[in-house]
Amino acid sequence: MDLGIRQAGFEISACIEIDKNCCETLRTNFSNGTKIFQGDIRQFKPEDFATEQIDLLFGGSPCQAFSQAGKKLSLGDERGELLFEFIRFARTIKPSAIMIEQVKGLLTAKDLNGKSGGVFENFIRQLENLGYVVKYKILSAAEYGIAQKRERIFLVALTNDRFNFPSATHAESGNLFCLPYKTVGEVIDDLPPPQKKSAVHEIPEDSHIDITPLRDRQRIHGVPEGKYLSSQLQLPKDQICGLTKKDTTKFLRLARNKPANTLRGGEIFFHPTEDRYLTPREYMRIHGYPDDYILCGSIRGRSGTFKDLDQYRQISNSVPPPLAKVIAEKIKEALLCQRFMNCSAIP
C-alpha cells in the first residue's frame, strides 16, 4: 500500500509494522523521510503522530481472524481486534481520509454475541460516529491491470461524500470499455532464467532465485499447465504424496494465458512450464511491483519455519501497488474537491 499511495502523490510520514523483515524492506525502499517504527501497534500512542494534519490514515490489519481459509475466530483471535486500532488512531489524529484493506470474510465475521456481520457493522458505526462517510467495495486486482485474481474488500472513509471507487480498466475477455486481463505469461516471460539457490552465497537483490529442491522438481513434473497436482490421480502415489480428491486446490501450476490465482505465502505456485516453484521476483511481477523494488529478509524453502516474514509471505500479505495507487488517486481527487468546494463529485 505504501508504494501505491506514494505513486498517487502522497508523502508518507510514518509506518508502523511489527515484522522485522517488512520494516527492513520499507527502510530500503523509502529512505526519503518516512519514519519506520517496528513494534506492536497497540504499544504506540496516537498523539505522538498527531503533530501535523494527516490527509490519509491507511493500512491493513492481519487477516487471519477473518479469512475463509482459517479458523474464522474473528474477535476471538487477538489479531482480529487489531482492526479497531484504526478507530483508536482516527479518534486522535482526525485524518481527512481513511483507507483499509481486508479479506472478504470481514463482511460476515461474527461479533462476540455471535451475530454474523456484527464486527463490520460495529466498525462502520464507530467510523460514522467520528464523522466519516464510509464506502466499501470488493475489488478484484485483475480488473485493474494486475495479473492475479485477488479479491479483497476496500473501505474508504472521508469527511465528505465526494469519493467514488475507480472504475475497472480490465475485463476477462476485454470489451469496448476495458482491456483484457493481464496474464501470467505477459508479466513473467521476459525474465531471465533464475539463479539456483545452491549456486549463490547470498540472496541476489532482484530476488529472482529458484528454491526448488530435486525431489520437488520430480513432484512437479507431470502436472499440466493450469492444473493442480491433487487432480493428477494418474501419477504415482508417492508423487501425489497423500493428496486425495478432497484436496481440490493443492499445488497449482499456473497457466501462461490467464491471471494467477490469489498468491499465498503458505503454498508457492508452480511455474507454468518449468518444473520449479515461482521465484519471489516472479511473485512480485504478478503482484504489480516494479523491478526496482527490493525485498529484504529470507527466502523460505519448502521446509522449516520462520518467525519473521519471508519474501513470499511479504508479497502475498501485501496489497498490489497498482490497485492501492488507483484508489489513492480517487481519494486525492475527493480531498482536493473538498478543499476547493466548487467541484462536483468525480465519477
Image: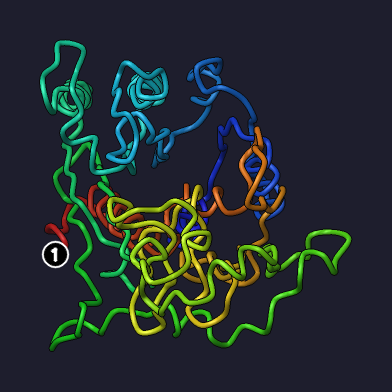
Q: Residue at x 56, y 37 (%)?
A: 15
Q: Quadrant of residue 29?
A: bottom right
| Up/down of 57 relative to 339, above or below | above
Q: Position of residue 51 (x, y in %)?
A: 53, 26
Q: Position of residue 322 (x, y in %)?
A: 41, 65
Residue 76 image position (x, y, % from top left): 32, 16
Quarter containing the C terminus: bottom left
Q: Is residue 162 left or right of residue 310?
A: left
Residue type marked 1: Pro
Name the residue: 43% across, 61% down.
8
Q: Nearer the viewer, residue 251 or 105?
A: 251
* Residue 189 percent location from the top left of the image: 53, 86
Label 1, on which residue? 347
Given the current orientation, which residue lies at the most extreme top position? 113
Q: Would residue 332 be visible to someone looking at this image?
A: no
| Residue ID at (20%, 77%) | 171
341 or 31: nearer the eye?
A: 31
Secondary element under disc 1, as helix, strand or loop, is: loop
